[in-house]
Image (cartoon, rainbow, N blue to C red):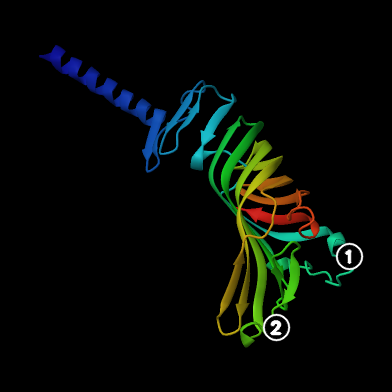
Amino acid sequence: MKRIIFTLALVAIACLSFSEAQAQAFTIDATGIKFNENYDTESTVSVSPIVRVKKKKNSTALYLGKSARSTIPAFEIGWNVLSNVNYAPYAGLNTGDFLDLHNWKSTQVTLNLCSASACNTAIGISTAIGLRFNNYRLDESLTLAKGSLIMPVPTEGMHHRAAKKSKFTTAALHIPVELQFGNPRRFAFSVGGYVDMMINNHTKIKYHGGHKDKTWNYPTNFLQAGARARLTFHNFSIFCAYQPTQLFKTGRGPEVQQWTIGIGL
């Protein structure tokens, strides 16, 4: 009888020790099961709605979706400035600088819907796919008219109302790639580029009283491309982008280059 009691006591102590070890080995929360890195320095596996697999500490790992250690954020907002605007196709037409924008109202909004990165603790590469919207805020006294050559036309007199807002907007499929140095969850610097594939574009005039006018399908280039640099601190980033490609097709509108400064979250 004593031997039986002694044996049961040893089994109970072993079970308690095993349970404590398992508690140190992994945790369970709303995101799934996470094996603690401190428990085994050679391997880490995290099972959650977003899968992360890391074979060795400090080795390169692949991250997908929300868990991606990417410098490319899910949401970006920036402010557009057009530079080196060339009105050569309008020589002798006395059109003026009609692409002189309200810069603080000319915004760029990017929604990166899916991202991925391959990185270790020091360096990595990130990419994403998303949607980008550029708003070019024009002077409210004019809008753009389509034709063999895009022309500025006055909004005064349209619908017998004064215009409150006039803008030109583009929507595009956005694919960025960035080479990153550091951990974006702490501090990182990244450089890279992007390609935008135009989906549609339109002008919009908003009048006092609520009436709106839209005109679609201006002669813009299908492909837009640019370079970008970014600083990221605890997943908050500041970026500057330069786009040398032309917004409008050759000979159909002004030649422009675009700068964008903004933040990412």
Query: Seen in the image, is 27 located left or right of residue 210?
Result: left
In the displayed orientation, state which residue is furthest to the left.
1
Between 108 and 119, the one lying in front of the other is 108
Q: Which residue is mark 2?
A: 156
Q: Amino acid at mark 1?
A: Ala
Residue 35 makes an appearance in the image: no
Residue 77 position by quadrant: bottom right
Residue closest to the far right: 92
Rendered view: 89 above or below 43: below
Residue 55: assigned label: none
Q: Position of residue 92 (x, y in %)?
A: 89, 68
Please tell me which residue is depicted at 66% across the width and 60% down the height of the picture: 218
Q: Are discs 2 and 1 less than 8 Å apart at CB?
A: no
Residue nearest the viewer, comparing 245 with 110 = 245
Q: What amino acid type should be assigned to the residue bearing mark 2?
A: Glu
Residue toward you, 248 or 134: 248
Going 70% across and 42% down the picture, which residue do you hit?
Answer: 193
Does residue 230 appear left or right of residue 83 in this picture?
left
Residue labelled with disc 1 = 91
Q: Residue 217, image x and y in percent?
A: 62, 60
